Image (cartoon, rainbow, N blue to C red):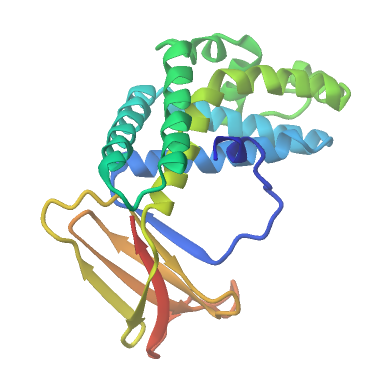
Amino acid sequence: MGKQFENLDLNSRRSPEYELPLSERMRTFLRLEFLYQQYSYFTEITTDWASRGAITSLLEVMAILTRGDIRSDVHKELDRHIGILTSYHSQPTVDPDRLNIMVENLTTRRDALRAIGTNFIQPLRDNEFLSAIKHRSTIPGGTCEFDLPEFSHWLRQIHERRKQDFDLWLGMIKPVCNAVVELLWLIRESTKPMEKSATNGMYQHKMPPYSHDQLVRVTLPEESYLFPEISGNQHRFTVRFLEWCDINQRAIQTHDDILFKISIC
């Protein structure tokens, strides 16, 4: 299971799934996953425009990782899921070999997280090259050649040379990001989707007391002309299905009864 996260097919077509995080921690994890995949995608493309996109993604990852103690949050989630999975050993219906692999993968992620220490992001923050780009990025068009000649010179290097720098920077954030991606995979796979119906295009759900659910996932058929607008929190949430025509018209709620699948993870 663990290897699949390091070889993600970022070009594959995603199924029409929509998610709502039910906590601030989960919101942060989803943003990190998104930026990590975006960074990984851009670094494999040889053009200088893609390298600009990769740098932007990296700076946004850094911004998230420097707010609060994300490493500690990820460590706590790993500990929690290792404890949950370990408790399943006593259940006769559980495949012990698969369970051991899952626990081993999470333990490996936890060990890698511990190994980087609490100051893992500091070398990126101290990097004058990245700091200059970050400073100028707050200005519209601020990373033009005349503003950042060193950045422009770096972009003119062959892709293999730029990729060396990308891989170096990736190594500093990889333990955190890989752990987040694996945790999200585990959370998403923890619940089977249920078939539901949205009356007049709306579905409401009240969470049970003391619920520990962290994520709502809505799946529609691939050919659907609708998209869901999900809003709520850990106590209740609402799904409204909207009809989309084009970018020049505001989407409106459908009045049809809509069959869909939902996972509350």
Residue at the (62%, 23%) spot, across then down: 170
- Residue 179 location (% of width, % of height): 47, 31
Q: In terms of depth relative to the viewer, which is nearer, 1 or 237?
A: 1
Residue 39 in the image: above or below residue 230? above
List the single residue furthest toward the bottom.
256
- Residue 172 location (% of width, % of height): 56, 18
Residue at the (31%, 39%) spot, across then down: 89
Quadrant for residue 255, please give it: bottom left
Number of numbered discs visible in the structure rendering: 0
Residue at the (33%, 23%) spot, across then down: 72
Residue at the (51%, 23%) spot, across then down: 175
| One can see residue 140 in this view | no
Residue 78 in the image: above or below residue 208? above
- Residue 2 location (% of width, % of height): 55, 35
Q: Quadrant of the N terminus?
A: top right
Q: Quadrant of the C terminus?
A: bottom left
Q: In terms of depth relative to the viewer, which is nearer, 30 or 81?
A: 81
| One can see residue 213 in this view | yes
Q: In terms of depth relative to the viewer, which is nearer, 60 or 203?
A: 203
Quadrant for residue 44, please give it: top right
List the single residue furthest toward the left.
209
Task: Name the side, left or right, on which 58 lies relative to 151.
Answer: left
Residue 212 in the image: above or below residue 7? below
Residue 220 in the image: above or below residue 217? below
Task: Name the side, left or right, on which 130 lies relative to 104.
Answer: right
- Residue 250 location (% of width, % of height): 49, 76
Q: In terms of depth relative to the viewer, which is nearer, 131 or 85?
A: 85
List the single residue furthest toward the front.
92
